[in-house]
Amino acid sequence: MTPLPPKEAQAIAYQAFMYGYPLAENYSILWQSTLAVQQQFNTFYGKAQLYGPSDTTVITPNNDTAYSQGWLDLGAEPIVLQVPAVPQNPPRYYSFQIIDACTNNVDYVGSLTTGTAAGNYVLAPPGMVPSNVPNATVIAVPGRYIFLLGRTQILGPSDIPAAQAIMDQYALVPLSQFLGQPAPAPAPATPFLPAASSFVTTLAFFEYLNLALTFQTPPAGDAPLLDRFARIGVGPGLPFNPSTLDPELAGALQRGILEASNAITHKTKEGAVENGWNMPEVNLPYFGTDWWTDYDFRSMIARAGIYANSPSEALYYRAYQDTHSKPLDGANRYTVTFPAGQLPPASAFWSLTMYGANQFLVPNSIDRYSLGTQSNLTVAADGSVTIYVQANAPAGPKMPNWLPSPPSGSFYIVLRIYGPETTSYIPPGLVQVDSSNS
């Protein structure tokens, strides 16, 4: 490696972290979800239950759907995603988000995109894309390791068995088996590295990034960046050993990592703000598979809520502050009032979900973590709906509309709109009423 001035090394490390953070986080989740717990590739895991505070694998989880998760290893052959007909009486949302190693959303299978009839979908990596498969739709994916994140709406606690019956019919089948042909030879094994979440803040980050960069061929437009990163030993399959680095260089690289990580955290609270809500960016081609260069934004999404849906599938509004731009605090009480006829415009459903400073669901006395379409909300005489955001339970008729907050400290709320009917919606903000203890 050519010697670099510390300032230049730090700048390259900053840029490489911004570029590679989503890849490394995705790798960490892959490891934790498969090899660390001895779960298999090309197999679905998940059951019909809603997430709670103890679920900490993925930050900012929703509390509206049950997850079906499947990590695909397409090294040997394509895999067929099989879905059943999903009954729509009453209407039920479901989707499979097809995610590559860079956290791009390659495509969707689900009620908003492919409909609710039964179907077979062939997920095929480069060099293995068949021209035609009878009774199936072919979806080209960009790499060997692909994450399928399924969401099946649960229509209340009594609906769990019905949701489970649908989820039991989701299947992943090797293409050879689907076609009744002999299986191909196994693919060469990948030299996986055990991953602890702490690696993200250390120089070991670059070891994991170099491995993750081998999972799919980077877009041609990334070549100039990768050439620059190679100057600090970062690139697909390159060796990176922090213990052999000159201390001055190691210090510069570490400063670049920490500077970039802090910048990403700051970016999660940037962007247009209306009524205290960080508005979703709906006009950028993020999450697509075409070459796109706003790597800072991609990293911000990975930090704020990795595996977020594309705007056509769902919109996310995040509130860290009230209508007067004051940070939300559990010591205070707030209300959110939707005027008559102005609930969030969703063709599928909407929800408001509470998160603590740790980015996970907030424990509370009634195990309620979200409110929305499926809630039996109290409607005022004028047709409006008011949500009460506070730590202590409100009185009588307000109870169905209570979204419990932590007793103290910062928190944030996410409004999700699945099947958004418009991209111009501005939610009403959180209005501070008084102190929770007053």
Image (cartoon, rainbow, N blue to C red):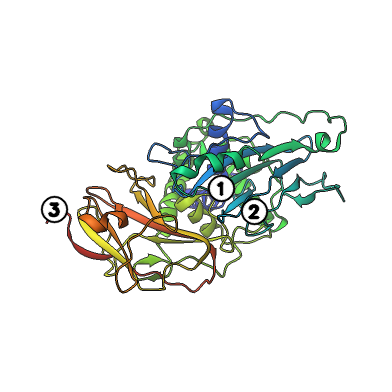
Residue shown at 49% from the left, 74% from the top = 424
Distance from disc 2 to disc 3, alpha carbons, whole Å, reads 45 Å
* Image-based side of 264 in relation to 87, left or right: left
x and y percentages locating residue 3 in the rendered image:
56, 44
In the image, 80 versus 229, the foreground residue is 80
In the image, 254 versus 138, the foreground residue is 138
* Image-based side of 158 in relation to 128, left or right: left
Residue kind at label 3, given as amino acid type: Asn
Q: Residue 147's quadrant in the figure? A: top right
Residue 268 visible to an observer of this rendering: no
* Image-based side of 192 in relation to 401, left or right: right
Of the two numbered discs 1 and 2 on the same chain, state the one appearing first in sequence: 2
Q: Residue furthest top?
A: 38
Residue kind at label 1, given as amino acid type: Arg
Dot 1 crowding, Cα within 10 Å, few <14, some 14–19, many 20+ = many
x and y percentages locating residue 188 in the rendered image:
75, 29
Q: Is residue 285 above or below residue 399?
A: below
Instruction: Indicate which label's residue lies in the foreground, 2 or 3.
Output: 2
- Total marks shown come to 3
x and y percentages locating residue 399 in the rendered image:
27, 54
Residue shown at 58% from the left, 54% from the top = 89
Dot 3 crowding, Cα within 10 Å, few <14, some 14–19, many 20+ = few
Which numbered dot is residue 110? 2
Determine the secondary structure under disc 2.
strand
x and y percentages locating residue 87 in the rendered image:
62, 51
Residue shown at 36% from the left, 45% from the top = 358
Which numbered dot is residue 205? none
Q: Which residue is mark 1?
A: 151
Of the two numbered discs 3 and 1 on the same chain, state the one appearing first in sequence: 1
In the image, 221 versus 40, the foreground residue is 40
Q: Which residue is mark 3?
A: 437
